[in-house]
Amino acid sequence: MPKILVIDCSTGEEVIRDMNTEELAQYEKTTAELTLKEITEEQTPTEG
Amino acid sequence: MGSSTFPTPSVGGRNWVEIASSTPTGVGTVSFTSLASYNYYRVTYYGDLSTNSYLYMRLNNSATNYASTIISGFGSWNSVYGITSSFTFGSNGVGVQQSLMVTLDNTSGLTTASGTVFSGVGMNSFEGAWFTKEQINRIDLTTITGNFSSGTIKVYGSN
């Protein structure tokens, strides 16, 4: 389970915990998307 | 002809207030929560990431409706990312010795972002938009692979 450092900026409290269900869902969505994007970019370079 | 008044020069620059600072290790995500309301936010980071890693940023833990364009200083890549689930920085594996500065404008009807990633091997300039008027109250910064091992992340606010 990915770890997340949560900083409450109103109190300064810092906690390291496992991602909750919603956070994990967003994390997995983004990670999968970025992996796909990397593959796509590698296939379509443009010379600048 | 009426009298005219030369406009008072504005004070140069924006008065940024530091909201939070963190030097994370052993985690891949840092979440700044319960942010006070500001019109503008700035996020800065300098540190080492794993080779071929890079960063992405999510606002209010929302993974929808981000658009971004990155122009890379490598001279060989021009990326338009379209609609994605995050703002992404430092792609193409420039995660080592990477510094990041992003300014978020929360006042324009939608949230827009601009920023730059500097690294030892190139530079990425970034423009993006998060399609919402929602007030920012949380900023998450995540490495695509590995954990933060050095460096400090700072969050600033300004009106």
Image (tube, grey):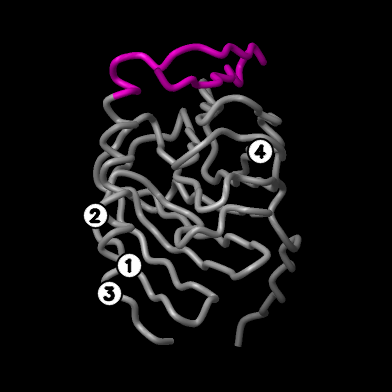
Residue at figure coordinates x 47%, y 40% from the top left? B145
Question: From the image, which quarter does the C terminus of chain B lie in?
Answer: top right
| Residue B107, position as x, y percentages in the image | 44, 48
* Residue B52 in the figure: left or right of residue B120: left
Residue at figure coordinates x 25%, y 47% from the top left? B65
Name the subunit of mark 1: A
Which element type, helix, strand or loop, lies under badge 1?
Answer: helix
* Discs 3 and 2 carry the same chain letter: no
Name the subunit of mark 4: B
Residue type beneath disc 4: Ile
What is the distance, in whole Å, between disc 2 and disc 4 at their CAs? 26 Å
Indicate which disc, 2 or 4, sits on the residue closer to the N terminus: 2
- Is residue B7 in the magenta section? no
Please report contact status of discs 3 and 1: CB closer than 8 Å, yes or no.
yes
What is the distance, in whole Å, between disc 1 and disc 4 at their CAs? 30 Å
Label 1 sits on residue? A42
| Residue B35, position as x, y percentages in the image | 54, 26
* Residues shaded magenta: A1-24
Label 2 sits on residue? B83
| Residue B62, position as x, y percentages in the image | 31, 33
Task: Tell me if mark 1 has few (under 14), some (14-19) or many (20+) residues whose alpha carbon lies within 10 angstroms of its own.
Answer: few
